[in-house]
Amino acid sequence: MPTADELISAGTVHGLAAVLREAAPRASDWRAVTGSAAGLGALGLSERARTVGAAMLADVGGGYGELASAVRAALARPELTGWMIWPVSEAVATAATAPGGDFADGLHLLAELTPRLTAEFALRGFLLADLDRSLAAALAWTRSPDPAVRRLASEGTRPRLPWARQVPALTAAPGVTLPILDALYRDEDEVVRRSVANHLNDLSRLDPGLATATAAGWARRADGATASVVRHAMRTLVKDGDPAALELVGFHGGREDLRVLGPLLERAEVPVGGALTFTARVTNVSDAPVSLVIDYVVHHRKANGRTSPKVFKLTKRNLEPGASAELTRSHSFRPISTRVYHPGEHALQLQVNGHRFDTAVFELTPAQG
């Protein structure tokens, strides 16, 4: 993945300054923008965007009207494109939401900028300044003929948008963006639908019940692409073994449909650095076929003596009535950089379609010399 200094580089800034000088000449000759390239140093990507955006405001004297006029003049040139758009959109957001700015026109200008790259990050400034007005504008954008603007409506309002400033009001009330998602989940453009799925996945981390209920409603009003949207939106909950999410993506079979034997452990003790083999059997005791995601959970002992569960993938199986799945797995306790093993009592259990079954206890012992 490109680094920050490759995306918003000195060359990017000099290119922006050249476009501005040609499209919107000023007495300042856009010297602050040009000079900002020297101060990027070790700044991260969002800091670079805000630094260059602040330089734009310095060159126009900070007023929104002057800035908007210059930006619209530059938009007439195809050279205004790519990563130089982020600093421009940040300048627009700062000026439009400041006293004396023009909030409504600033939002319109973001919609004009977003097809050149994206204005999703700058939208956060508007959301922080006035959530209700910004969400109303985003809902209106869902009816835009331009897919880039429709994507802005979904992507810019994501509760956990990567690289972006967080908007506490979005995480405090996850449901406020649902009208936007409901308007777009069947969008004709795949990129827009992908954004909707990512947005609902964000919501699933904040309120799983709200996310699965929303996805279930979409499934009842589906078109040909809705199943794919739901699968992508439910990916975190599926990984976590959420039963409602698993059912939405096609896995069915409840606790009452299954008989689970095990896990049966090969031994009761395993040293750090060793492996524990276990077996299990899952039987479909219902009178209908079931489709299963079978995982296992290791309850690791922590330094304070408590345990913490970690889910590991095992297999997926379709079972006819009366059929069984015979399972075997060897789980390694070889030390890795992301986990410290603490000797003591641990436990292991099977998880099928999100439902956890009996627990088997074993002792993790110190590494053998």
Image (spheres, rainbow, N blue to C red):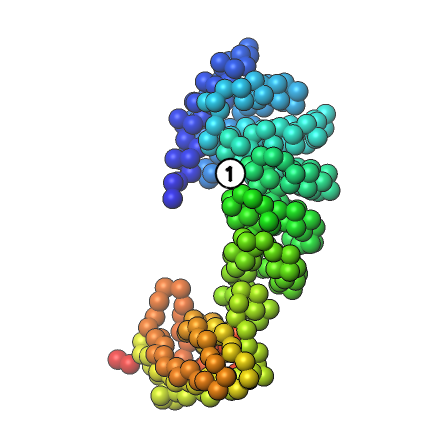
Residue drawn at x 51%, y 77% is 290
Quadrant (top left/top right/bottom left/bottom right) for the N terminus: top left
Tell me the kind of residue under disc 1: Ser
**Element at label 1:** helix
Residue 241 pos. (x, y %) = 53, 70
Q: Is residue 266 above or below residue 211?
A: below
Observer able to see residue 342: yes
Q: Is residue 272 above or below residue 92?
A: below
Residue drawn at x 52%, y 49% is 194
Residue drawn at x 44%, y 33% is 8
The mark tally for this picture is 1
Relative side of 156 to 261, left or right: right
Q: Which residue is mark 1?
A: 46
Q: For the residue carrying disc 1, how many other residues have a C-alpha within 10 Å: few (<14), some (14-19), or many (20+)?
A: some
Residue drawn at x 44%, y 84% is 324
Q: Nearer the viewer, residue 312 or 315?
A: 315
Relative side of 138 to 38, left or right: right
Residue 247 pos. (x, y %) = 56, 69
Residue 59 pos. (x, y %) = 56, 19
Relative side of 293 to 125, left or right: left
Q: Is residue 136 above or below residue 343?
A: above
**Dividing the picture into quarters, in which one does residue 165 lie?**
top right
Quadrant (top left/top right/bottom left/bottom right) for the C terminus: bottom left
Observer able to see residue 164: no
Residue 251 pos. (x, y %) = 52, 70
**Dividing the picture into quarters, in which one does residue 70 lie?**
top right
